[in-house]
Structures are given as structure tokens and as C-alpha cells.
Amino acid sequence: MTSKEIRKQFLDFFESRQHLIVPSAPIVLKDDPTLMFNNSGMAQFKDFFLGYKKPTSVRLADTQKCLRVSGKHNDLDDVGKDTYHHTMFEMLGNWSFGDYFKKEAIGWAWELLTNVYGIPKDWLYVTVFEGDKKDGTSADTEALELWKTHVDEDRILFGNKKDNFWEMGETGPCGPCSEIHVDIRPAEEKSKISGKDLVNKDHPQVIEIWNLVFMEFLRKADGSLEELPAKNIDTGMGFERLAMVLQSKTSNYDTDIFQPLIHEVEKISGKKYGEKHQTDVAFRVVTDHLRAVSFAIADGQLPSNTGAGYVIRRILRRAISYGYRFLDMKEAFIYKVFPILKEQMADFFPELQKQSTLVTEVIKEEETNFLHTIEHGLVRLDNFIKQNPDLKVIPGDVVFELYDTYGFPTDLSRIIAEEQELTIDEAGFETEMNKQKQRSKSAS
């Protein structure tokens, strides 16, 4: 099943159940002071949950472009190093605003996964909220009883507030949730260790695939909870992870979402994916970050030195750095991969076609400019290491200078240090970062 078919089947399923299909909101948020980027499917519907606005339909479904790089959902440092974290990803979601609640949300999720997508029932585990004394919330026995009509009780686990109480941020709509996890390990491994023991343990093949949030509370600034005007449903299913499962892959990057991009980078760089760990990390960083930056630019966010623009610039520079260091790409090349992304996704996200020239030109210009400085950064670091032969730890102020003056990603300094059997002074770097933040505050 292709990724396009997977996306279409999801939307068709909910459209046949009286859901209005709505387009994705922009990946960049301009009117929410609490968020720079859409980091979940529900961000554009926040006012509906709060009762401030009325939706065009009480049932909606969509696929939302999301970006997670900072704050509570910080994935940037993980991206590329494993096979399932991303900066930009799609979140498939269905929504109910004061209409249906747990029974339908749970029943339809199970039906779609097992009957429509054909995922074997014995691959799946579900979690429910155990309650939290501090918040005064009780265990979600209602969800437990509903799940027991679909799945054996020994496949249902209770989870704590960290895993089974979803919150948008420090304040805002929130509620208990049920996660659906899938175990795609080989049968031999499953016979040795139960998947139940690996749920929420960061196992790359026992992963959360869908989160059903029963949105019924508002987290206030003082930390207390109050009930929302209505009981709502907010679900989010990771599109890339779903494709991995349905296409029988063990890595998101092996799906047809990423493979065309990886093949293009192979063609341009002359390197091969799957031969060397650090090269593979670079392939994943470049292809993931291209997606994030392209969608952000297409939605109107240009790279800059402040705010959301700075985040986009940092993501792109991380990709350029990995390409330079591990793919031997000394000239701009990432912009050349964009046409493949556009070909893949413009039919569902037409902004990629409409803003094609802008995206290409901005990425090329950013690459060209940064490549002029990255060489100086590498020379500076190499010289420092050579001049200090007894060095064990690279000082935090040196790492900060590379970061601040040359735009050198800290994780690249870390990798180069590890290659020389060195470490970096993480605490010292953080101290320098905090000093800069204080200077910025004083200047403003």
C-alpha cells in the first residue's frame, strides 16, 4: 500500500462517518503566542475546544503538517540518529467537538487499524490513564471497559500522567488519552519477550502509532484543571510510522515517503545509503530537514536570525553541516532534492507547487551563504584540537563560539569531538548560551 493510498483511506474512512475533511493549517503559527509552529493536529482547533468559536462541522478529519523542534516536544537532537524521529511529520486526525466521545473514537480506531489497514490484532497493545492524585483525576475505567470489548485485557496497560494525559503545553486544553502501540518485531523476538513489556520503553519496533485524546479539561496558569464546555475527541496518528508498519519496513526512512528523497541524495552525492552509520545519519538528517524547511518556507516563514525564522535556519544549517561533513558535499545541493519532494506531495499540499520557485531559491541561497562559513568553523575546531594535544574536553566557550560566530551546530561539534575521543563541556556551553540570552533580554 502506497503512502498516498494510506492517507486517502484514512480520510475516506472518516468522511464515510460524517466527518468534514479539512485542509492542513500552515505549519507556522502567526496568531498563537504560546506556539511558534503547529506541533500537533489540534493546534488549529484550539478555540473550538475552548468554546470560543464554533466549527463548521462537529466532526472533522484531516492530515496536519507538524513541526517539533523546541519546547515540550523537542525532537531535533534525535532526528537522524534513530529511524523514527522527525522534525516535520504528518499527523492524521479525527475530531469531535461535543459530539461523539470515547465509545466511537475507540471503536473506529480499532476498526480502521484491523479491518481496513489489516494490522493483525495480536500486534497491538493499548494504554489507558491510571489517574493522578495531584490533579485529582481518577483512572479511566470507562476507556478500559470499552477497550475490553475489542482487545484481550492482557493487552491493555495503565499509564501514568506522563504517557497517558495529553497536554498541548503548560496551559490549554488537555485530557486523558489512550495510546495504541504496535509490535512489529520478528516472531522469534516476540516469543522471547512480550511486547507488553516494551510499550513506552523506546524500542524502535514497539512504537506508539495512534493517540486518542479525550479532551475534557483546561490546564490553567496556576496548574489547576477545570472542565471544558464540552467533551471532545482529538486523535493523532503518525503518518510516517503508519506507513512503516503497513509497508512492512523497520524504519520510516525505508518507506516510499523518504526513499525517493534518499535516492536523489545518493545520485547527487555519489554516496550509498545503508553502508555506513554516520553516512546514513547524514542521509536521514538531510531528507528530514529538507521536508521541514520546504514546508515552512512554502507557508511563508523565511530563515532569519530571530524567532521562528531562526529555528528554520538552524534546521537547514544542520542539514548543510551533515551533508558537508559526511556526504562530502562542498557545494549547495539540498535545493536540488526539492523537486522530488514537490512531485511526491504537491497533489495533497499544493502550496509546494505554488511556492516552488521561492522554496528553491531560498534554500539555495542559505546553502551558498552557510558553506562560506562552515569551512572556517571546521578549521577553527581542528586547529584548536591540534594546538591542545593533551585536551580531553573541548571548553564550552569554544563550542559556543563555533555555534554563535560560525553557525556551527552543537551536535556536529559533539560528533567531531567523539571522533577524536574527546567530549565537549556541555555545562560550559549552556552557561555561555544563558549569558547570550541575558544579553538579548537586556538589549531588548
Image: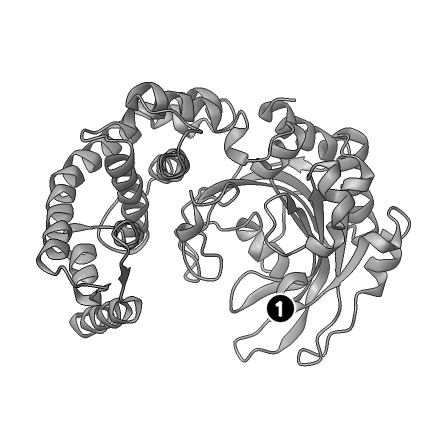
**Which residue occupies the foreground of this view, 383 or 413?**
383
Residue 375 x, y percent position in the rendering? 13, 42
Q: Is residue 244 above or below residue 382?
A: above
Q: Could you tell me if residue 59 is visible in this image?
A: yes
Q: Residue at x 14, y 48 (%)?
A: 377
- Name the side, left or right, on which 105 lies relative to 440: right
Residue 38 in percent (x, y) is at 47, 49
Circle 1 Cα neighbour tier, 10 Å, few/some/many (<14 / 14–19 / ≥20): many
Check disc 1 and report the residue beneath it: 218
Q: Residue furthest right?
A: 149
What is the image's colouring? one colour
Q: Name the residue at the front extreme.
A: 390
Q: Quadrant of residue 424?
A: bottom left
x 51%, y 40%: residue: 83
Q: With respect to residue 173, does 95 lie above or below?
A: above
Quadrant that contains the N terminus = top right
Nearer-the-camera pick, 273 or 79:
273
* Left or right: residue 164 compared with residue 378: right
Q: Is residue 37 visible?
A: no
Q: Decide if residue 51 is on the left or right side of residue 105.
A: left
- Is 360 rendered above or below residue 159? above
Query: What residue do we see at 68% from left, 39% from top?
Result: 185
- Residue type highlighted by circle 1: Leu
Q: Which secondary structure, mark 1?
A: strand
Rendering coords of residue 236 (x, y %): 63, 46
How far across and how far down the image is residue 359, in percent?
30, 31
